[in-house]
Amino acid sequence: MINRNLIRIRIVQIVYSWYQNTNKDLRSAEKELLFGLQKSYDLYFYLLLLMVELTKAYENRVEAKKNKHLPSYEDLNPNTHLIQNKFIMQLRSNTQLQKHLTERPLIWDADNSFLKNLLDTLLDSDTYKEYAAIESPSYEEDREFWRKSFKQFIYLNEELEDILEDECIYWNDDVEIVQSFVLKTIKKFSEKQGAEQPLMPMFKDDEDREFALKLLHNTILNEKQYRDLIEKHTEKWDFDRIAFMDLIIMQVALCEICTFESIPTSVSLNEYIEIAKSYSTPKSGTFINGILDAIVQEIKEENRIFKN
């Protein structure tokens, strides 16, 4: 689940912090990197849990209405599609989800007002009304209801993003990426898998974890090599006045280009230019693109990298 885009962003942040700290310890930086990536994985489970918690909030609301002093016919005969939703029942009992929540507890109890408002929005929607009108929803219809609801009311929800940022500083930059993985997870659910439906692993494979650690180590340990290249190709600018974040992004990008032969240079360049657009100045993407293009051309001509 932790893809290389997220790894790159996290390493740029860690390397930036490395130069801000007086106590420079590579082992501590490595621990900080892995801790931050673990928190990103926690967010994945936290968002899966949100659908379960919304269902629980609806169950509580239905029960409260039934127990009113003078319940109406509608109070006594509510639509129970949400409560009996087969996808949610499968998710709620998922072995991997329950194991993660046992080892790393996550709760939504502090955000009851958000849950209430989100549930109200969901129940007032056309998506819910169409779902509620189905006489006896199939598993696929139950799952599709939650896929649509997550995409419409949870994905890119600004109030949710504010809550998540307050909840954990490591989640500020993760929300959109992790939400996209939750949507992919919903789509992959199969009724026949039952409680053993596999969720996404933290890393796709050991290679991604090694990519993260190697990129961090080499960026820091080979600082002089990469900084010299950058300084040589920024003669038209005052090196000391280059935006510090631009310098860090170029240093990490050069490390990736020079270290990982299996990653096409164009892929690395595009990824770090996008990071620059989001995390540095408005002109940083163009500036970094020009400098890195010139450096890559030079080291290719000198046969210091052998890839496209």
Image (cartoon, rainbow, N blue to C red):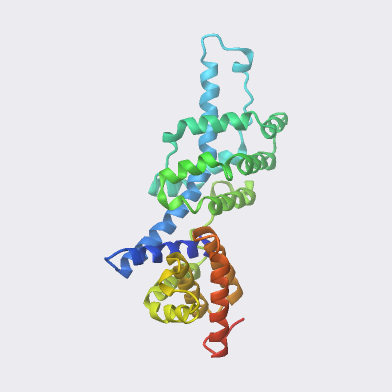
Which residue is found at the position 50% from the left and 33% from the top? 114
Whether residue 198 is visible here, answered yes or no, is: no
Q: Quadrant of residue 134?
A: top right
Q: Quadrant of residue 153?
A: top right
Q: Nearer the viewer, residue 232 or 162?
A: 232
Give the vertical position of 79 relative to 176 (above or below). above
Q: Nearer the viewer, residue 31 or 78?
A: 31
| Horizontal relation, residue 119 to residue 212: left or right | right
Which residue is found at the position 57% from the left and 74% from the top? 290
Which residue is found at the position 57% from the left and 86% from the top? 300
| Horizontal relation, residue 102 to residue 250: left or right | left
Which residue is found at the position 52% from the left and 50% from the top? 175
Give the vertical position of 267 relative to 140 (above or below). below
- x, y (%) of residue 181? 57, 53
Counting the numbered discs, the total is 0
For this orientation, the residue located farthest to the bottom is 302
| Horizontal relation, residue 297 to residue 136: left or right | left
- x, y (%) of residue 26? 32, 70
Specify the quadrant that holds the C terminus: bottom right
- x, y (%) of residue 2? 50, 60
- x, y (%) of residue 25? 29, 68
Give the vertical position of 31 relative to 57 (above or below). below
For this orientation, the residue located farthest to the left is 23
Q: Nearer the viewer, residue 18 or 65?
A: 18
Whether residue 139 is visible here, answered yes or no, is: yes
